[in-house]
Image: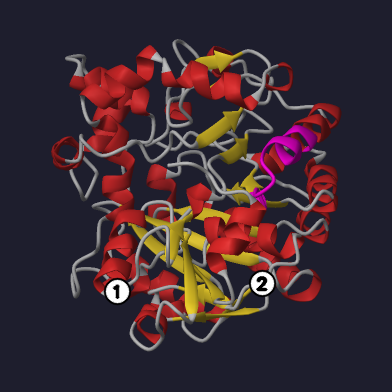
Amino acid sequence: MNSLNFDSFLTLVANRQIWIWGAGNQGRGVCQALQRKAIPVAGFIDSAIDLAGKTALGLPIVSPNLIIQTKSASQVFIIIASFYFEEEIKSRCCLSGFKENCDFIVYSRLKPNDYAIDITGACNLKCVSCPHAYNNPAERRSGVMSLENFKRVIDKIVAESPFVGNLQLYQWGEPTLHKQLPDMLRYANAQGIKCAISSNLNVPADFEAIIEAKPEWLRLSTSGWGSHYEITHTQGKWPVFLQHLYEVCALRNRIHPEMKVEVFFHLYKHSQQAELEQWQKTCAELAIELHPVYAYLISLDDVLAYQEGKALPPIAQTTSEMLLLPLEHGLAEAKMEKHLPCDTFRCININWDLSVSNCMMYYYPTDNVAVDNYLDTSLTEIMKVREDCNLCQRCMDKGIHRYCGVYSRKRIAPGELVSDNMIGESDV
């Protein structure tokens, strides 16, 4: 599908209200890009009940029925901006009489590429579902991106992808380890790019300086409550995490109340109802979002090798036995979606050393370096190399390109752990 430029987009929208379906990272990014060009947005659509009545970027968040069942296509134009729920939302729009590429579009027509900048390859924890648990950092050429290179990367992104309104400053590393993170956030903001960061909150970082630099949102990961947290967030300290959580939320309220804070609660066999109820209370108390998700093995290197007949590394094998949604179940569902496109092909992952990964979901650099220097290679060249990538072919042959989405989209059965109403389109 061809991408749209601003003039073509304005012609398509005509005089209709623009609503963005998905109040998460992608939706906010599209909104910011439109606002940067003085194109008004009416608000966000999201099915998550805990977001109803709230705002994002100063705009209302409403339920889908309020738009698709009460307004006609002559009144509104919808941009679907949800990473893993795109097909589901398209179906709902079509059933309500909205026509694709006439009354609604997917956000990739405006922004064909998403960006992640891994400003540091290092992490302070050894979480069991992550390859950091059992790989020597030297194997990943662990290091940090210089502020000068970061500025040049941002400038190139803005020049090549005018609809980009935000990006994430993490993939495999812990961004709060980077001492110049506040400077990076300030520079990106000055160029009209909002940045998301993720943290395990176990670093003695200057959180006040970070929040003063105004990140767009902060994603926090946890996998239990109390001592259970440390089972899978290995080398993490629960008291440190909890202390920093309250500190960050207090700083958010005082310095940057617009910053979105969300907790991704990874569900394992040992972290279910009791822990989840604790997190529900805490997130309500702190006025932050809670997203319960099924845990899964995150490095597709191990998953692909397993599908090709190799044994899982010992830690990965132990972790797979802790999963609520078994690895074999996830792989079977992914294989059923083998004919569908890859969710992450649109994502350009720029590593701290300026290399670009063929796929952001693979950890090892072997067979996974598209180009050595992002700054020296055009976006067109990068995408061409990735299209011809052998790793991608091996992955898609096994259906593993759909594996992460299986876990991310999986609804938690009502009454099993938590109402599925808590999970909406505000995903990555």
Rendering quarter of residue 156: top right
Q: Is residue 138 magenta?
A: no
Is residue 126 depicted above or below 138 in this figure?
Answer: below
> Could you say which is closer to the camera, residue 209 or residue 67?
67
Residue type at mark 2: give it. Leu
Q: Is residue 41 left or right of residue 76?
A: right
Count of numbered marks: 2
Task: Check the image and tell me how it is coloured.
Answer: secondary structure
Marks 1 and 2 sit apart, C-alpha to C-alpha, by: 29 Å
In the rendered image, residue 340, in percent from the top left (x then y), is placed at: 25, 39
Q: Is residue 365 left or right of residue 197?
A: left
The N terminus appears in which quarter of the rendering? top left
Q: Is residue 208 left or right of residue 143?
A: right
Tell me where the magenta segment starts and ends, as one range.
155-166
Q: Is residue 210 left or right of residue 282?
A: right
Q: Which residue is mark 2?
A: 57
In the rendered image, residue 424, in percent from the top left (x then y), is placed at: 38, 68
Q: Which residue is mark 1?
A: 97
Is residue 259 depicted above or below 198 in this figure?
Answer: below
Taking the spot 65% from the left edge, 48% from the top edge, the residue there is 164
Rendering quarter of residue 290: bottom left
Instruction: Assign a secondary structure to mark 1.
Output: loop
In the rendered image, residue 298, in percent from the top left (x then y), is placed at: 38, 36
